[in-house]
Structure formats: structure tokens, C-alpha cells
Amino acid sequence: MKNSCSGLPDERNDSSWLDSFLISFLEEPTCSFYGWGPVQIYPAYTEIIRQDTPSGAVYFLKSGQVKLTWADQEGHEVIAGLRHQNWLIGAPSVVLGKPYSFTITTLTECALRCISAEKFLHLIKTNTDFSFHLMKLLSQEIFNHARTLVTLGCLPVKERLKYLLFKFIPGMPSKTEYDKHVKINLPLKHKELAQILAVTPEHLSRLLKEMERCHEIKREKDGSIMLNLDSFHSLSR
């Protein structure tokens, strides 16, 4: 039976309209007037927000990558998603006045700006431009969640893996031209990568070996992965 999905979802340029607004707004010296704190650097694997704690602040992810995890009462943990630069973390919980839904942990060194929940709510009530872009951001998040479910349901796991690896190319999402080969450092454990792809770690191991045999990737001794971009051509268009 032929797969009804025609291609991979391309999130690289989804938020370009939002990036330009947030970058300019949060780089202005006057943004501190609204209550945004200075940029702070957080090392990799630092917990920023904990699931089910009161929503006390919103964070702007100026650079870096974070993961969203959810755990049940027995401590079973799953990765609910990844977030990259120029994203607002914790905004839905603050707007709704509910506890944080996920634990947010840095995957790489991250630069973040923070604003208290009280000042963030005041900002969206008094600044119509910011409120409009926040509404678009939250709509984009809903759209991405729905698209992720469709992707899991109708794209082969190999294509999902290639798409995920491609997103970790240095300089993403803005960079579009590369050499034939590019090295990525994947800040995810093997088990975490399998969780995101909704496969077992054993199946992921077999898939990576198959991609190596086909010269699509090459795993290095330092843990990095060399991508043969000829095999990722459809993702770079």
C-alpha cells in the first residue's frame, strides 16, 4: 500500500516571521523595561523548568537546544519534543495559569532570557504587537504537534531519523548550503533518540547500521555522526 504522505514536514522556516520579531524585540535595550532579565548562559544538561511545578516565569531561548520530557507517577519518562533557538519556553502554562506540563532540560549550552509570569502577563496585556506574535507562536506550536502525530503515523522511520539528524546540523535552522559531508554532535542518548522516533533502541541500532552500510552516515569514535548530504538532498531543498 502506497504511503499517502508526500514528504517530510519542514520546520526550518516555520518561525522565520517570528524569529525576526522576537530577536529585534528582545535585543532592544528597552525590553528590560517590560521585565526581561539579562541573557544568562546555562551549561548542557541543566534543568530549567520542572514538570508540575507552579508556572512562575517564561524563558526566551536565544540560542541552544532543549528537550521537553514528561514523567508519570511511577517515574517512567518520555521525551515530548525538542525546542531550538528563538522560542518562548513555558508561555502556555503561564497564560493558562497552570503548572508546567513538562520538564525542560538543556541539551547544549543555552543562552536564555527570563521574565516573571506576572510581568509576562502584563506585557501581553499592554503590548499588542507582542500579543499578536505570541498568539502566532502558540498556534505554530499546536500546528507542529498535530503534524508530528501525522509524521509518526505515515512516514517510514528511516525518513524520520534522517529528518531529525538533519535538524542538528550546526547553524540550523537558518543555514541552507553545506559541503557534501557535515559532522553533527547529537546531544541525545541512544534511548532518547529511539523515544523521539517511537521505535525500540534495538531497531534504531539496526537502522543506523543499515545507513552506515549504505554510506548515508558514518559514526565517529568521538560519538559524532558524519552525514553524507547527497543522501539528505530532499531535506535541504
Image: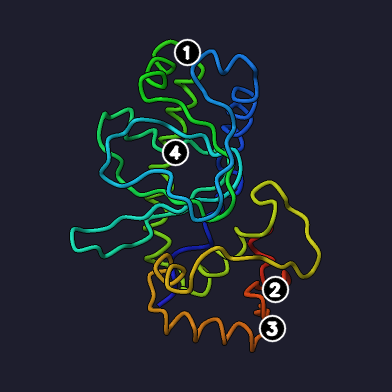
Q: CA distance from mark 4 to mark 1?
A: 19 Å
The secondary structure type at the circle numbered 1 is: loop
Residues at badges 2 and 3 in contact (C-beta under 8 Å)?
A: no
Kind of residue at disc 2: Met
For residue 155, the mark is none
Q: CA distance from mark 3 to mark 4?
A: 37 Å
In the picture shown, does residue 220 fall above or below 39? Answer: below
Is tag 4's residue or tag 1's residue first in the polypeptide sequence? 4
* Residue ranking furthest to the right: 179
For residue 127, the mark is 1
Give the mark toward the camera: 3 or 4: 4
Estimate how packed mark 2 is, as few (under 14), some (14 to 19) or many (20 or more) residues with alpha carbons within 10 Å: some
Is tag 2's residue or tag 1's residue first in the polypeptide sequence? 1
Which quadrant: the C terminus? bottom right
The residue to which callout 4 is attached is 89
The residue to which callout 2 is attached is 226
Q: CA distance from mark 2 to mark 3?
A: 10 Å
Kind of residue at disc 4: Ile
198 vs 99, left or right, is right
Is tag 3's residue or tag 1's residue first in the polypeptide sequence? 1
Give the mark toward the camera: 2 or 3: 2
